[in-house]
């Protein structure tokens, strides 16, 4: 069997593995020759050959990378709705979501949770939802008090901080 390799076809990893499968099937080339022909390492071809022996060409088909998601798409939509309600609706006394709180919310509503809080962060990032800042201002926020603090207290604190010096 003669296989002519074109650089444009061998750039796709899936295509390379399928060409390797055809070359394994033909049995005319060593693994080292196949590696040179495809522009990959001998170790990669050896790994592909073992997979091919165990499962045929289907064993070389590309699979999705990464772990499965913790929540189903419908559960993710429900979680976003729960987050939109705000932390106070779920028993916390302020308007700040934390990764730990969100993980607890997931556990309470869906019966599962992330072992590591970075999983919560990655899921929220994938869903396009930042967790650091509330989506809306707190209902109990007093704009007059905030403005007064910014204009009277903060400037005094800021001025006196340079007098204290490094700790």
Image (cartoon, rainbow, N blue to C red):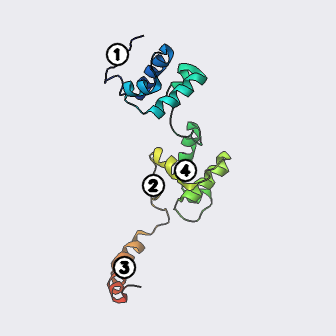
Q: Which residue is mark 4?
A: 119
The disc, 4 or 3, on the residue closer to the chain's N-terminal end is 4
- Residue lying farthest to the top in this orientation: 1
Q: Which residue is mark 1?
A: 4
**Does 47 appear above or below 26?**
below
Question: In the shown orientation, is residue 125 left or right of residue 74?
Answer: left
Q: Is residue 143 left or right of residue 92?
A: left
The label shown at residue 88 is none
Instruction: List x then y, in percent, for residue 48.
Output: 51, 28
Quadrant of the rendered structure where residue 90 is? bottom right
Q: Could you say whether the residue bearing mark 4 is in a helix, strand or loop? A: helix
Is 48 left, or right, of 38 in this rendering?
A: right
Image location of residue 8, percent across then percent down: 31, 24
Report helix, strand or loop for mark 1.
Answer: loop
Residue annotated with mark 3: 154
Residue 165 or 139: which is nearer the viewer? Answer: 165
Separation of residues labelled 3 and 1 (CA atoms): 73 Å
Which residue corresponds to the image point at 50% horizontal and 52% vertical from the top-left?
121
Mark positioned earlier in the residue sequence (2 or 4): 4
Question: Contact, CB < 8 Å: mark 4 with mark 1?
Answer: no
Write down the residue under mark 2.
Answer: 135
Q: How far separated are the C-alphas under marks 2 and 3?
A: 25 Å
* Residue depth check, mark 2 versus mark 4: number of the one nearer the observer: 4
SS for dot 2 = loop
Query: Where does residue 71 sit, x and y in percent of width and height?
Result: 59, 41
The residues tagged by marks 2 and 4 sit, at their Cα atoms, a distance apart of 21 Å
């Amino acid at each position: 069997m003669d296989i002519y390799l074109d650089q444009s076809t061998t750039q796709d990893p899936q295509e390379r593995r399928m060409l390797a499968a055809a070359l394994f099937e033909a049995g005319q080339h060593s693994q080292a020759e196949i590696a040179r022909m495809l522009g990959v390492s001998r170790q990669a071809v050896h790994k592909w050959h073992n997979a091919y022996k165990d499962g045929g060409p289907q064993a070389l088909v590309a699979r999705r990378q990464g772990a499965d998601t913790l929540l189903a798409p419908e559960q993710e939509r429900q979680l976003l709705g729960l987050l939109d309600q705000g932390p106070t609706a779920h028993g916390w006394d302020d308007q700040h979501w934390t990764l730990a709180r969100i993980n607890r919310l997931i556990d309470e509503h869906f019966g599962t949770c992330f072992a590591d809080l970075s999983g919560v962060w990655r899921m929220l990032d994938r869903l396009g939802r930042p967790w650091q800042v509330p989506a809306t201002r707190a209902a109990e926020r007093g704009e007059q008090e905030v403005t007064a603090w910014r204009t009277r207290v903060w400037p005094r604190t800021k001025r006196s901080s340079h007098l204290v010096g490094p700790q």
